[in-house]
Amino acid sequence: MSDTVNFGDQLVSPAEKTRRVGAVFSSVAKRYDVMNDLMSGGMHRLWKERFVARIKPRTGERILDMAGGTGDIAFRMAARGSLVTVSDINADMLAVGQDRAAAKRIEGLSWKQENAEVLSFGDAAFDAYTIAFGIRNVTDIPAALKEAHRVLKRGGRLFILEFSTSDWPGFGKLYERYADAVIPRIGKAVAGDEESYRYLVESIRRFPTPDRFRAMIAEAGFAQAKAEPMLGGLVCIWSGWKI
Ligand code: SAM
């Protein structure tokens, strides 16, 4: 990895990026779920439903939901009978997730604080690895993809949901204008934190295109790496197999 990486539009050291991303999610953890609804007009729920429909979680399957945060993806997979480990680098996000799981009486989940770049799990421990709106926040993305490959069994599936770049004429620019002008203001009004939401907008803009990220997944050793763009690629599901 190079000496500097982007934290949003700023260049910082890798350690500083990890620290600042930690501060962002600790700051927003308690308002994270309501903010997702406000910023996306509820659309994140549809994207997450589609994501889980692609994963097709099965009863008894072991699934690692990395950067699982407050549990949105894990809850949907546990409802289908999978044994889900929710992992996140941020203890504050996990704490909100655990409270939500208890309130909803969701069972079959285990919770573990982990950095996606250096997992403590053994080789071939999981049938599937999922990461939703998490990978763009990871400092060393190739390292995280390699770890995903290591902890999957042969025949295991990788699924990634993330913002990317829309190739619909005009739509990408329109979204950028909305994101720049509106999201930090909602962040200020609702979560009392404009800066964290400015980072989230900037980090979305900097994420690779669907095709470029598909190539990164293939470079990490996954077979049949595929990108399924939604809204022209503004949001995208990538998948791959460990064979
Ligand atoms: N997956 C959840 C969802 O879809 O609602 C949460 C997504 S939230 C936008 C991004 C999450 O990535 C945060 O909870 C953050 O703590 C986590 N994260 C950032 N860097 C990470 C890392 N290196 N390892 C694990 N989790 C990380």
Image: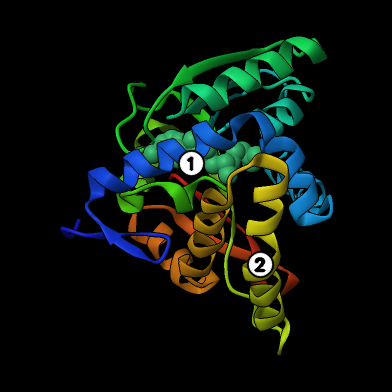
> Is 119 positioned to the left or the right of 160 in the image?
left
Task: Work out whether residue 66 can be spotted.
Answer: no
Q: Residue at x 24, y 49 (%)?
A: 14
Mark 1: amino acid = Val
Establish whether ligand 1 lies closer than 8 Å to the Cβ of label 2.
no
Q: Position of residue 227 (x, y in %)?
A: 59, 64
Q: Position of residue 58 (x, y in %)?
A: 71, 28
Establish whether ligand 1 lies closer than 8 Å to the Cβ of label 1.
no
Distance of label 2 from label 1 (alpha carbons): 17 Å
Mark 2: amino acid = Ala
Which quarter of the rendered picture does the N terminus lie within? bottom left
For disc 1, the marked residue is 24
User: Considering depth in this image, is 175 or 59 the residue closer to the camera?
Assistant: 175
Task: Work out whether residue 192 can be spotted.
Answer: yes
Q: Position of residue 133 (x, y in %)?
A: 58, 48
Q: Residue at x 71, y 53 (%)?
A: 186
Q: Position of residue 72 (x, y in %)?
A: 71, 33
Q: Which mark is residue 179?
A: 2
Q: Answer above or below: position of 55 versus 47.
A: above
